[in-house]
Amino acid sequence: MFTRMLKLRLLNAVAPAYFFMATAVTFILHFGFFIPTIFPNPDTSLRSSTMLHTAVFLFLMFNALGNYIMTIKYPAESANETAVPVCSPHCSDKVDAHYLLNGRHFCKLCKKVILKRDHHCFFTGNCIGNKNMRYFIMFCIYTSCTCLYSLVLGVAFLTVEYSISFENPLTFLTLLPLSAGYFFMGTISGLQLFLVLMLYVWLGIGLVCAGFCCQQVLLVARGQTWCQLQRGQLQDNHSPWRANLKDVFGTRWILGLILPVQTVEMCSDDTEVLKQD
């Protein structure tokens, strides 16, 4: 158990650094390579296209980073409980969290009591629960959109700069192994290999975030959390799915779709505990 906790703590420190590094690399590639190459003459008729792609990328990046910050700014911890609790005999997750009562958990990584805990996110370094679930879901949505949009521009860049045709679907599937082979043979540069690698990174992160977002929205609509699902509590919540979504996304949910702002009034800890009964 000690070794596993050590690995989790290490992951909790490395994952945020990886996220910021990937964000910085994506930002540099967009404005240092993609936009200047795909739209080489901004003073011509392509100026509107350049501005459009720049605005779309900045909008996606702003919302992804904004909701990332909001996820950390509004943690799901309880302000009334600071003591380390004793693990319940029915705890289904004895490694990184203690299950208490009324939907509360004590996270060993956060060292805090979490209200309506869903899971611990290593990329944000905190637990996802009642107060930051909405921001976490929007973070996943915009991260997925940013990665998939970067993938499209990356493919366009390779087509323009290196004359690589992607008309054949097998081209993308074989691009990484072939590029690695050509790199060790000295045929292509390290930059081209790195760009190809980033295409697969964007594709993987985009698909994972999209799938994870769908799972979270489904759980929210059912009024459940991942921790409850692990304990087999599938029929405890009988609220309508609209009420469950409103409880997380708030009444101003449309505004929350386009801006990383607070759309739900924060309830007190006691109110949240009563909702779990």
Image: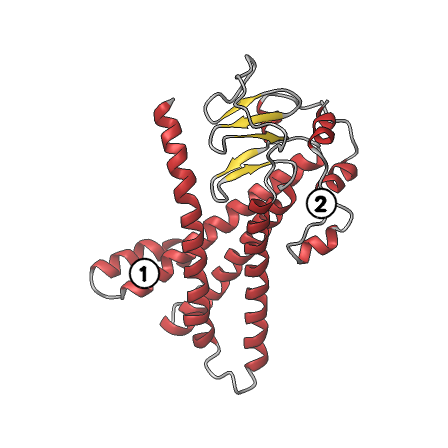
Q: Which residue is mark 1?
A: 193
Q: Residue at x 45, y 81 (%)?
A: 40
Q: Is residue 109 above or below residue 149?
A: above
Image coords of residue 81 (percent x, y):
60, 27
| Residue type at numbered disc 1 | Leu
Would residue 201 be found to the left or right of residue 180 on screen?
A: right
Image quarter of the N terminus = top left
Taking the image as drawn, is residue 14 in sight? yes
Can you say whether 124 is above or below 106 in the image?
below
Q: Secondary structure at mark 1?
A: helix
Q: Residue furthest top?
A: 89
Residue shown at 78% from the left, 39% from the top: 242
Element carrying mark 2: helix
Asked whether residue 170 appears in the rendered view, the answer is no
Please report the residue visible at 25 percent of the width from the left and 57 percent of the height from the top.
181
* Crowding near the residue tagged with mark 2, few <14, some 14–19, many ≥20 C-alpha atoms within 10 Å: many
What is the quadrant of residue 137 in the picture? Answer: top right
Please, what is the three-letter code of the amino acid marked with disc 2?
Phe
Is 269 left or right of 38, judged from the image as shown? right
Report crowding for label 1: few under 14, some 14 to 19, many 20 or more residues within 10 A (C-alpha). some
Question: For the C terminus, which image quadrant?
Answer: top right
User: Residue 230 in the image: x percent, y percent?
Assistant: 57, 24
Question: Residue drawn at (50%, 56%), measured in percent from left and top?
Answer: 147
Dot 2 or dot 1: first in sequence order is: 1
C-alpha separation, residue under disc 2 versus residue under disc 1: 41 Å
